Image (cartoon, helix red, strand yellow):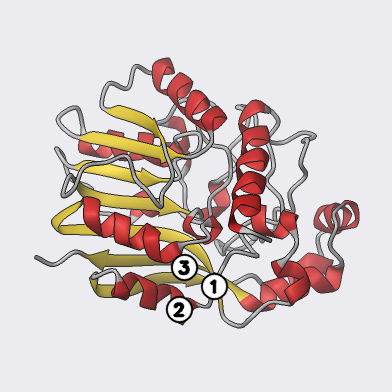
Amino acid sequence: MEDHEIKKIVRDRYGKVAKSASCCGPSEAPRLELTPKTTNTSRIEITPKTTNTSCSCSSGIGYTLEDIESIPEGADLGLGCGNPTASADLKKGETVLDLGSGGGIDCFLAANKVGGEGKVIGVDMTPDMIDVARENALKRNYENVEFRLGEIENLPVADNYVDVIISNCVINLSTDKDKVFQEAYRVLKPNGRVLISDIVLTKEIPESLRNNPDAYAGCIAGAILKEDYLQKIANAGFKDISVIEENTFPEAAIEEDPDTLEKIEKSSFTLEDIKSVLASTQSVKVKAIKKP
């Protein structure tokens, strides 16, 4: 697939997510939500699912009940693979940038930490997501949060402007990850830091999945090998790069979950496809610093 085709697929799919209001019920674009019931390991998303405000979609990937209750209803779209704000060590007065802000869950959590004297900017390329996030901000009158329409490969943010960059299961969707990290480096202040939750590969996935639109929109087909991901961060100029958390999914849990098996049957994937994905993917949390 060409880059412009991939971008359109991603924008269209997540636009549908933003327009919908069905987290725990039926969805226009069913997603396989492979979250073990007994562990805190990562979920593997095959196609985006849609959400409502009656439940927490992200409780299995590092968000606490207190986190969910502290943000506006409708901000938790259940699209992440971790909780980057939990490890970002955010301080009062800092300026935070969220790459691919979606419904705003991480922006609002960050805003609660940096306080009224701080600022949070969310950037997303999907107009419907920006609309949802702005509506969510109005629900609790977040005056220190701003949502901007833009692409993470060409950030609508000034040079040396932010203290911290966070991102949650978004950079894997980009077809130009080098440019994403270069832009992140550009907008960070000296000694600024990035804290990213994302999906990476431990080995290559089948070519059939690489070319599957559902797999791309679901954070799989665009993922790259972990060592290549970390090297791209280093190539952009970042230092002190570390993987502070990594999680895998136990393959056996699929066959023990009837709900997951039912979702597989309704998708364009086979059970063997999913097992192949699980054997090849990790959810990681990466930290890096922009040294002066």
x and y percentages locating residue 22 in the rendered image: 71, 30
Q: Amino acid at mark 2?
A: Asp
In 3D space, how far apart are the residues under numbered discs 2 and 3 (Cα atoms)?
A: 13 Å
- Residue under pointer 2: 228
x and y percentages locating residue 20 in the rendered image: 68, 28
Would you identify the image quadrant in which residue 196 lies?
bottom left
The quadrant of the image that shows the C terminus is bottom left
**SS under mark 2:** helix
Res. 187 in view = yes
Residue found at x 54% / y 72%: 224
Q: Is residue 16 above or below residue 255?
A: above
Left or right side of 93 for 152? right
Sequence order check: which comes first, mark 3 or mark 1?
1
Q: Is residue 288 above or below residue 8?
A: below
- Residue under pointer 3: 284
Sequence order check: which comes first, mark 2 or mark 3?
2
Res. 35 in view = no
Residue found at x 28% / y 36%: 120
Q: Amino acid at mark 1?
A: Ile
Left or right side of 285 for 202? right
- Dot 3, how many residues are within 10 Å of its Cα: few (below 14), some (14-19), or many (20+)? many
- Residue under pointer 1: 224
